[in-house]
Image (tube, helix red, strand yellow):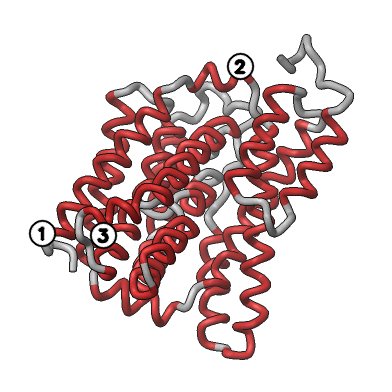
């Protein structure tokens, strides 16, 4: 177990560089990047802890900005306005339920918040946006992301056959997938497996929900700043916490989306920017995973996973009932 008394293996440094290079490859998924980094950190150790923390802090906001280049604000705004009230209500309810579960299960505050935010909006992207604002610690981010990615993989496999068994049409399935699957990539995969109309509905509705990252991140940042002011002079922050950031990268996210939407000549470069941002995010997840230790995992425990699973199951069941009953249409 790598720690102060058990230094990293000699293989840790070359494998850190090799893993970082693989994380940038197009075939490496976000989940694989996080898992690979975690395996390295938990077995051989992290030979460059300080450097990986620095690059994590730099890459995370830049990746979020770049992801804006994959959005068409016009199409997203139309979908968002169509179900504005229902979307806002569902996000508030899921977030509230997630925070209640975190308190009930005695989950670490920041880890519980990240899992709730990731479930309420759009998985890893929402976690990536909120984590630096609340100064989450690296292992808290890792646990939240791992929970989300595990449930994403299950949803990608289970949703299409469940949808067919329940007799969902393509529009209904698209709505359900956008509501109950965490990450946009898994929503796209499930929609593609169900049919072209399901893919169109699921993608558009999910991207509309993703825009709620902006106000939610600003609001959480405001509340967290107030909490910190009240706690000023108390116990200092943990050394591995992400640095406090004003959510300037949210403005960058919107600016990037606006440029790609209203300047047609930028749409092709926008695809490349979004692709580069996705690879940067995978690299960031690899570095976050590499910062994990067994001691950190013991501090967090099994409760965050239980919170994430229970919250996801409730969202899946309630969402399915709402779609089949016509409440969501």
Q: Nearer the viewer, residue 85 or 302?
A: 302
Mark 2 and mark 1 lie on one chain; the one further toward the N terminus is: 2
Q: Is residue 257 left or right of residue 32?
A: left
Residue found at x 43% / y 51%:
156
Give the residue at mark 2.
Answer: 295
Callout 3 touching callout 2 (CB < 8 Å): no
How many C-alpha atoms fall within 10 Å of the one at disc 1: few (<14), some, or many (≥20)?
few
How many C-alpha atoms fall within 10 Å of the one at disc 3: few (<14), some, or many (≥20)?
few
Mark 1 and mark 3 lie on one chain; the one further toward the N terminus is: 3
Per the model, the C-alpha gap separating discs 2 and 1 is 47 Å
Q: Which mark is residue 90?
A: none
The x, y position of residue 64, in whole percent, is 57, 59
Give the residue at mark 3.
Answer: 88
Residue found at x 63% / y 53%:
281
The x, y position of residue 39, in whole percent, is 67, 29
The x, y position of residue 273, in whole percent, is 66, 70
Residue found at x 36% / y 64%:
194
> Does residue 227 appear anywhere in the picture?
yes
> Relative to 261, does residue 285 appear above or below in the rendering?
above
Residue found at x 45% / y 48%:
221
Q: Nearer the viewer, residue 80 or 152?
A: 152
The x, y position of residue 320, in whole percent, is 21, 53
> Relative to 246, does residue 299 appear above or below in the rendering?
above
Please identify the quarter of the rendering in which residue 76 is found: bottom left
Give the residue at mark 1.
Answer: 325
């Amino acid at each position: 177990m790598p720690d102060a008394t058990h230094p990293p293996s000699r293989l840790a440094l070359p494998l850190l560089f090799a893993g970082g290079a693989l994380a940038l490859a197009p075939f490496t998924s976000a989940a694989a990047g996080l898992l690979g980094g975690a395996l390295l950190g938990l077995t051989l150790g992290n030979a460059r802890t300080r450097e990986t923390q620095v690059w994590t802090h730099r890459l995370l906001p830049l990746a979020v900005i770049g992801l804006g280049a994959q959005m068409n604000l016009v199409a997203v705004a139309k979908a968002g306005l169509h179900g504005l009230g229902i979307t806002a209500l569902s996000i508030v309810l899921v977030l509230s339920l997630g925070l209640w579960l975190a308190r009930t299960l005695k989950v670490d505050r920041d880890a519980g918040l990240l899992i709730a935010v990731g479930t309420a909006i759009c998985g890893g992207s929402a976690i990536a946006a909120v984590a630096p604002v609340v100064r989450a610690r690296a292992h808290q981010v890792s646990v939240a992301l791992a929970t989300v990615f595990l449930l994403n993989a299950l949803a990608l496999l289970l949703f299409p056959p469940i949808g067919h068994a329940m007799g969902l049409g393509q529009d209904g399935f698209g709505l359900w997938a956008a509501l109950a699957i965490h990450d946009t990539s898994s929503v796209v995969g499930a929609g593609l497996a169900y049919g072209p109309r399901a893919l169109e509905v699921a993608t558009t509705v999910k991207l509309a929900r993703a825009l709620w990252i902006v106000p939610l991140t600003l609001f959480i940042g405001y509340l967290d700043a107030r909490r910190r002011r009240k706690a000023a002079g108390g116990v200092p922050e943990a050394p591995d916490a992400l640095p406090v950031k004003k959510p300037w990268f949210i403005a960058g996210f919107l600016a990037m989306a606006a440029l790609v939407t209203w300047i047609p000549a930028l749409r092709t470069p926008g695809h490349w920017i979004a692709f580069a941002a996705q690879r940067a995010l995978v690299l960031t997840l690899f570095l976050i995973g590499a910062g994990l230790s067994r001691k950190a995992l013991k501090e967090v425990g099994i409760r965050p996973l239980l919170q994430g699973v229970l919250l996801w199951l409730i969202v899946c069941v309630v969402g399915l009932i709402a779609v089949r009953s016509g409440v969501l249409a």
